[in-house]
Amino acid sequence: MTGATEALEEINVSTFTNGILDPEGAMLGPVRDGGIIRASTAPGCWGPMINPRLRGGHEVTQPVFVENAQPGDAIVIRIKDVTVTSIATASGHDRIVDGYFVGDPYVAKRCPTCDTLYPETRVEGIGQEAVRCVKCGNPITPFQFAHGYTVVFDEARTLGVTLNKEQAERVARDSRNFAKLPECSIQHSVLLFAPHDLVGTVARMRPFLGQLGTTPGVRMPDSHNAGDFGCFLVDAPHEYALTAEQLELRTDGHMDIDAVRPGSLVVAPVKTRGAGVYMGDMHALQGDGEIAGHTMDVAGTVVLQVQILKNRTLRGPVLFPLPEDLPFLARPFDTAEKERARALAKQWGLGEIEESAPISVVGSGKDLNAATENGLNRAAELLGMSVPEVRNRATITGAIEIGRLPGVVQVTFLAPLEKLEDAGFLPLVREQYGIG
């Protein structure tokens, strides 16, 4: 931990990691329980992917120490604001280039010409060979576009339109300005590549945070802080290799779940002293599953409020999304629906109907089946239910939603209020949905 020893009411974050989350690393703060974190965030994915100095696939904010947070607690993160500052970005489906990495192109990039690991780079011109090794001058491109696009946003940040070749190259020549990269960001903007396979395509914006959570209990690359990408670290041939047991110390902060947006509540596990709250990988928009592998990563500003939930051990994140982001079957029943349900119950001689509220439990794993099993088991353990009961509830009062392929899901359903109370979540349910 660095900075003031007395806990702050509010902290401003403008510095970033080199792509590695480390429980032994320096943290900002401390911020007090109930305090505010304001941050400028850098784009995730493509920009860090094409800069070998960044070792995690993303460039997330330096973690913040929360006063009195201890392993075994949880942190309630209230997302107050997420604002896109980028004027343009580029993205698309990637193609991995062999020879430019050791085991994992997101983590251990190398120059195949001079064999330098994590080489320093410079920019020469635009296009997919613009990023070059300082030592030997060779293009250092572990990723290229199989199909990509450049998009510019309207002033109100409500929609974007994809550009043609001439326009994309114009943006590429002033990439850092159009990307609005924060001052401390060291990534190269992917706008340099000027992809233009989609032209004139219109997309609605709905920004959210692809990365939001707490520092894992073991050192790991930021984009691998989830069960799917994290699997690549097990027995990997580079310095960030983990065992399967160590991977369980992840906190699943890399969710890529589009419900993680202003107004939602994220409850994150604490697995290291001070929690180490971090964020990044802001997305301008995303369809469920992020099926292209990447979406419109942007720079932006974020405002969060953090609150400690003492002695609430979690294996992974729990979400309380905005009502409009809930699956149809998981939305709270209104007064008229409850009256009809009570009438039906009375007709059949039943007693009181169950009082319930939504909960969304994040699961992750090497693929969607493994992620779903992980989420079901987490939900069952959290609420004192059997897995078959969670399966039934998610089927008739909720859904399994895909955050990201290959393996991040939300297990969302209506849970009995008494179970939510026993889990310590009733105040959050009351706050978010006015129930209980």
Image: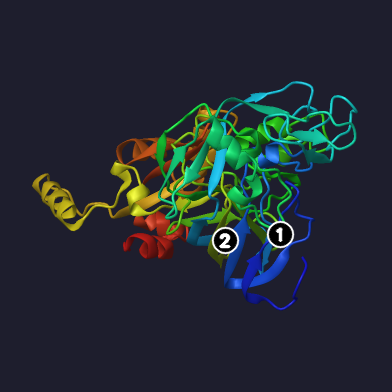
Task: Give the residue pinned by disc 1.
Answer: 15
Visual colour scheme: rainbow
As displayed, is residue 96 above or below residue 151? above
- Amino acid type, label 1: Thr
Q: Residue at x 44, y 43 (%)?
A: 160
The x and y percentages for residue 248 are 67, 41
Within 10 Å of the Cα at label 2, are there few (<14), some (14-19), or many (20+) other Cα atoms? many
Marks counted in the figure total 2
**Residue topped by disc 2:** 75
Residues at circles 2 and 1 in contact by the CB criterion of under 8 Å: no
| Residue 357, percent from left and from top | 34, 54
Name the foreground residue: 43 vs 359: 43
Provide the secondary structure element on which disc 2 rests: strand
Who is closer to the viewer here, 85 or 44?
A: 85
Q: SS at mark 1?
A: loop
Residue 287: give x, y in percent of width and height: 44, 37
Quarter occupied by residue 26: bottom right
The quadrant in which residue 273 appears is bottom right
Q: Is residue 392 above or below residue 272?
A: above
Which residue does the image show at 86% across and 38% down from the upper left?
A: 134
